[in-house]
Image: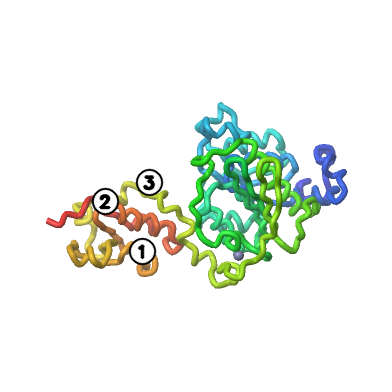
């Protein structure tokens, strides 16, 4: 049994955390609760950097950092964990190295991949609390729905320009879909700009809400019976209660994460992730074994009846409901230009019914369809 398992603080820890353990409502018991906690930080950008920095310094026992991006020069204006020498490095990895120099007693895990419906379960299930430090609705809905599934509290935050908002969301009381029932296309910081100190403030508020929840210090005045959304605009801020919406399909139990699959995928992304080996020509198709190969035209019925090169017709929008991918069968999609065939693969790869080992059996003909 290591000293970490002991239910008391070491002498070093007593010294390190003295300024917070001497606070009323915190004490050594609050510190021990932080030491036993696992926090998942999704996104190590403008919000994730300050949040991770304060949670590391405060002594959270284990922090997992999720980010697939590399540090770039334009990040340095607000992503304060990074230095010029980090440009080109993975953000989760670079942040871990920097954070660990502040506190070598805690465990920090770098996960250099994008959050997706496949890895979200594992990552969220093993955490006590999740911080949403992303900049898009697709990830936020995914975090919301999986946290609701496992009944995990999470801290939502977003920033834009001179404004920010932050809320601790306890799925028992309400959820992000109660506030935003529909996928909204809002600009992110990359498109609209942000003053660097704003994510600094909002990310620090995320850390405060996380510490309050995990150490049970009751620092915030938020009633534990309701979720509250803090809205910050420049130097002023106000809060509103996030009531459970009667129309919320998630909170009412009408739907769960399996029904919201399309929300998690940004259709403009993912096409470039398809391996070249799965992009084929008509000649390549002829070479594939005919016996266990299914050719599928993903154009509309009207296009299919006008002209086709055989196979069955399942329009792209109906694909996920009508195609069950089976082992030992190869699937080849075709359309007019190759674009819809690629989208068919991208959407199937996002679909949980497609196991990783089946994905290579799916091909897109990227050659234009000739009606001559
Ligand atoms: Zn809800």
Residue 1 shows up from this direction = no
Q: Residue at x 58, y 41 (%)?
A: 161
Q: Is mark 2 within 8 Å of ligand 1?
A: no
Discs 1/2, front: 1
Q: Residue at x 55, y 30 (%)?
A: 86
User: Residue 325 in the image: x percent, y percent?
Assistant: 36, 65
Taking depth in this image into account, of 175 and 57 the one nearest to the observer is: 175
How far apart marks 1 and 2 lie (CA) works out to 19 Å
Provide the residue designation for mark 2: 366
Image position of 294 (left or right of 120): left
For label 2, the SS is loop
Q: Are marks 3 and 2 in contact (CB under 8 Å)?
A: no
Q: Earlier in the sequence, mark 1 or mark 2?
A: 1
Q: Earlier in the sequence, mark 1 or mark 3?
A: 3
Q: Earlier in the sequence, mark 3 or mark 2?
A: 3
Q: Are marks 1 and 2 in contact (CB under 8 Å)?
A: no
For label 1, the SS is helix
Provide the residue designation for mark 1: 317
Provide the residue designation for mark 3: 272
User: Residue 109 in the image: x percent, y percent?
Assistant: 61, 44
Q: Is mark 1 within 8 Å of ligand 1?
A: no
Mark 1: few/some/many CA within 10 Å (<14, 14-19, 20+): some
């Amino acid at each position: 049994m290591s000293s970490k398992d002991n239910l008391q603080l070491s002498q070093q820890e007593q010294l390190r955390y003295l300024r917070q353990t001497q606070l009323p409502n915190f004490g050594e018991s609050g510190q021990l609760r932080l030491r036993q906690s696992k926090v998942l930080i999704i996104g190590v950008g403008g919000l994730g950097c300050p949040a991770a920095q304060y949670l590391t310094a405060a002594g959270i026992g284990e922090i997992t950092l999720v980010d697939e991006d590399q540090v770039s020069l334009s990040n340095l204006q607000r992503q304060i964990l990074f230095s010029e020498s980090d440009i080109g490095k993975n953000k989760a990895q670079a942040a871990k190295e920097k954070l660990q120099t502040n506190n070598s007693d805690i465990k920090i895990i770098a996960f250099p991949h994008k959050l997706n419906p496949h890895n979200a379960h594992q990552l969220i299930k093993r955490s006590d609390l999740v911080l949403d430090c992303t900049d898009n609705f697709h990830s936020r809905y995914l975090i919301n729905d999986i946290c609701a599934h496992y009944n995990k509290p999470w801290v939502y935050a977003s920033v834009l320009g001179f404004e920010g908002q932050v809320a601790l969301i306890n799925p028992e009381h309400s959820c992000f879909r109660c506030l935003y029932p529909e996928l909204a296309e809002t600009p992110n910081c990359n498109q609209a700009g942000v003053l660097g100190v704003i994510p600094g403030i909002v990310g620090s508020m995320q850390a405060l809400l996380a510490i309050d929840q995990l150490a049970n210090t009751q620092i915030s005045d938020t009633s534990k019976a309701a979720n509250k959304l803090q809205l910050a605009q420049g130097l002023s801020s106000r809060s509103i209660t996030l009531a459970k919406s009667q129309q919320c399909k998630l909170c009412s139990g009408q739907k769960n994460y399996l029904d919201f699959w399309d929300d998690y995928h940004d259709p403009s992304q993912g096409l470039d992730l398809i391996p070249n080996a799965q992009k084929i020509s008509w000649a390549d198709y002829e070479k594939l074994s005919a016996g266990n190969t299914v050719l599928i035209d993903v154009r509309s019925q009207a296009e299919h009846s006008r002209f086709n090169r055989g196979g069955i017709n399942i329009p792209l929008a109906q694909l996920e409901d009508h195609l069950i991918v089976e082992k030992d069968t190869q699937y080849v999609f075709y359309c007019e230009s190759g674009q819809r065939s690629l989208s068919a693969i991208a959407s199937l790869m996002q679909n949980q019914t497609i196991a990783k080992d089946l994905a290579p059996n799916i091909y897109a003909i990227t050659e234009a369809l000739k009606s001559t």
